[in-house]
Amino acid sequence: MKHEATARVVINMPREDAWNLLKDLSLAHHYVPGITRTEITTDKAEGLGASRRVYQASGKGLDETVTEWNEGHGFLIRLHKDDKGAPPPFAKAAFRYRIDDAGHDCTALTTSLMFDMRWGVAGRLLYERLLHKVFRGVIRDVALSMKQYYETGESVSPAQLKQLRIDATQGA
């Protein structure tokens, strides 16, 4: 895919513990801002081919299907609506979660949105002039929220996320 927005954080827990949380596809609503509910939609709850639907407060759902699975280290999920392609403004979209050891009892988490834009030149301009920073911010928010959720076991509220952004900017 042509474009990618990536963020990286270090979580204060061993990779094995982080993997046990990451591989549970039913937990996304605890750390993805704007998602209120997660539903596993396949017989498989993890691994290649497993799917989930995540819901926004509006009730709109988005399907996510695992297309790559790297046991103990992460996976890639394709974003789509039912059997259709990615939702606008994307022509194609996928999200990668990757964890690696980061020293004693710490885990590096990298979140990445990889995508192609719709609408040809207009889509490219929309991305370059407006959406580039928005997408980077959203991916950063997911990483910050995952770190907070993994370390505390509590869902991240909008107020907490605001403080996490401030702390990240100040290097806390």
Image: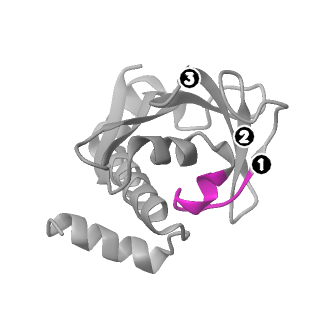
Tell me what residue is drawn at x 63 percent, y 53 percent: 27
Structural crowding at the residue carrying mark 2, measured as other residues with C-alpha within 10 Å and reported as few (<14), some (14–19) or many (≥20): many
Q: Earlier in the sequence, mark 1 or mark 3?
A: 1
Q: Of the residues shown, which amino acid type is indicated by label 2?
A: Arg
Quadrant of the frame with the C terminus:
bottom left
Q: Which mark is residue 39?
A: 1
Give the spatial CA distance, label 1 vs label 3: 19 Å
Q: Amino acid at mark 3?
A: Trp
How crowded is the residue under tag 3: few (<14 C-alpha within 10 Å), some, or many (20+)? some
Which of the labelled discs sits on residue 168, or is there none? none
Q: Residue at x 52, y 29 (%)?
A: 75
Is residue 160 placed above or below 26 in the rendered structure?
below
Label 1 with label 3: CB-CB less than 8 Å: no
Above or below, 167 relative to 143? below
Spatial separation of the CA atoms under disc 3 and disc 2: 15 Å
Circles 1 and 2: CB distance less than 8 Å?
Answer: yes
Quadrant for residue 123, please give it.
top left
Residue furthest left as drawn: 170
Say which of marks 3 and 2 sits in front. Answer: 3
Circles 3 and 2, Cβ within 8 Å, touching? The answer is no
Count of marks, rendered view: 3
Q: Magenta residues, as a range?
A: 27-38
Secondary element at tag 2 = strand
**Of the two numbered discs 1 and 3 in the rendering, the one whose residue sits closer to the viewer:** 3
* Between 3 and 15, the one nearer to me in the picture: 15
Please report whichever mark, 1 or 2, sits nearer to the chain's N-terminal start: 1
For image coordinates 73% across by 26% down, the residue present is 84
Identify whether 110 is placed above or below 130: above
| Residue at which label 3 appears | 69
Q: Viewed as shown, does residue 69 lie left or right of 99?
A: right
**Which dot marks residue 52?**
2
